[in-house]
Structure formats: C-alpha cells, structure tokens
Image (tube, rainbow, N blue to C red):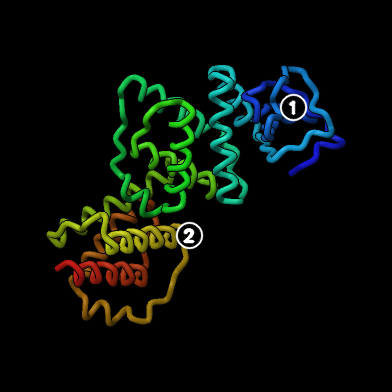
Amino acid sequence: MENLSNTNYKVIKVFNNNVLFVSHDKNEKILFGKGIGFGKRTGDIIANSIKIDKIFSIEDKSNNSNFNELASKLDNNFIGLCEEVIYMISNEFDKELNERIHISLIDHIAYTIKRLKENNNLNNPFLVEIETLYKKEYEIAGKAVKILEDRLKISIPDDEIGFIALHIHSSINKEKVSTAYRYTYLCSKIISFIEEALSIKIDKKSLDYARFLTHIRFAIERIINGIIIKNELLDVIKSQYSDSYEIAIKVSEIIQADINVKVVEEEVAYIAMHIQRIKSSIM
C-alpha cells in the first residue's frame, strides 16, 4: 500500500470506483484503490490520507498522447475495467510492465469486443504455439478473459486468450506484440517444414511438440542475441545424425532469411539433435 502524503493528485477522469486518472507535477498517472473513485469528480484533489494499491505512470509523450486519445473515445467504465485487468496482470508477474500495455491492450480489447458483438471472430492460427511457448502468459490471459466475460456479460473465444497472452509477453519483455507474433509464426513455419521433410505429423498436444517448440524458440533467441553455446558433440552429430543435420541446415536457412542473422554450426547441431529426438519418438 502507498500513502499519498506530500502529494497533490488532481483527478482528470474517474474511470470507475477503483480506478482514477490523475495529474501530478505535470505527469499523468493511473491510481488503483478500493473505492478510491467513489464520489470523485474531475478537478477533485485526492486527500493525503487516502491509501492506494498501485500507481501506473505513463511518461512517454507519445504513449501519453495515445492513452488520452483512447480515453476520449472509449467509455470510462470500460477503460477502468481494462485497467483492472492490467493491474491483475502486474500483480501476477510482480514486475514492471511496459507502459505501452495501457494503450495496446486496451485498444485490442476494445476492438475485440466490437468484433464479437458483430459476430466476427478472428481465428488465431498459432493458439497452440502461444500456449506452449508462453505458458504463464496464457494462463494469466485466461484469467483476464474470465474477468472481461463476467463484467461485460459476453463470451470470448480461446483465440483471444492467445492474442492477449502475446500482449502480456510483450509488455513483460519490453518488445512489440508484432515481434512476439512474428517469432511465434517463425516457430510454426519451422515445425511445418520439419513435418514435411520427415513426412510426419507432430501431435500439437504432445510433450514432444511442446519440448521441441520450446527448444526452437530458445535457439532463435540465442541466435538473435549472438549467444554461442559450444557443442562438444558437433562432429558426432554431423556423422551419426547426418539426415537430421541436413534438415537442421535448411531450418537454419529459414531462420537466417527471417532475422538476417547467420546461424553458427554449433546451433545447427543443437537443432539437429532436437530433430533427431522427434524422429526417434515418432518414426
């Protein structure tokens, strides 16, 4: 809990009884507290004795402008609800979120609700991949959807859990949602290539699939960040698992074409090991 002593928070908007949008020293903040917004109006000063649970700041000028634009177009109660969802996400991960989540997630939820009311559901082709790669984010996104369903009296399909999970992952890892989606797509593309190369179909609900997808995602992260892990079995893998190594070379070419970073032999060998493991468990 945070005490507001020695502060001068002026109410800009009352989103709901628990969420206020305020100004303080020329900065704008979002305050959370049980009943903090009850009876408040624009221009009111928050008493020093009031205790709050959370303060979010939107300091970037562009983010601040975009948030204010959203706040001018959307219903106050709706924004308050979305901010309660963001507050829940923040508590679940116990870490600072990228302030852009106050724009990107609210905008996404608003557009989603609009589409659903028009009976226009957007299919998420990478739902399984998202659930596998970002397990906790997916779990928390499920909680977010439950809150939205209960309060808005609307049914939200699982596809949206995946999209919200990407927003959560991006906010925690300080990357764009489009980046997380891009790498999820790249992982899916690699899986499809391997299935075709081996003439197999990997069960997306299996442990083998989850394990392999996770290894591929970590491999991509290492390649992007230039992290090289020495592979003592490089020559053995190239010799004993030559077919898998050849497929791994093709996989590395797919990665290189997408992220424009060379994949070193050691990483190719690790990919080959995971391909061989898939082969051994399925074929």
Label 2 or label 1, whichever lies nearer to me, is 1
Up/down of 96 relative to 57, above or below: below
**Relative to residue 15, is residue 261 drawn left or right?**
left
Q: Horizontal and vertical percent for residue 210?
A: 32, 59
Q: Amino acid at mark 2?
A: Asn
Disc ID at residue 94 = none
Q: Horizontal and vertical percent for residue 274?
A: 29, 68
Q: Horizontal and vertical percent for residue 182?
A: 37, 45
Q: Residue furthest right?
A: 6
Where disc 1 sits, the SS reads strand
- In the foreground, 84 or 251: 84
Q: Which corner quadrant holds the N terminus? A: top right
Residue assigned mark 1: 23
Instruction: State which quadrant residue 85 falls in.
Output: top right
Q: Horizontal and vertical percent for residue 32?
A: 67, 35
Q: Residue at x 61, y 51 (%)?
A: 94
Instruction: State which quadrant residue 238 falls in.
Output: bottom left
Q: Amino acid at mark 1?
A: Ser
Disc ID at residue 225 = 2
**Relative to residue 93, is residue 3 drawn left or right?**
right
Q: Which of the two labelled residues, at mark 2 and mark 1, occupies the earlier sequence position?
A: 1
Q: Residues within 10 Å of mark 1 (few under 14, many from 20)?
A: some
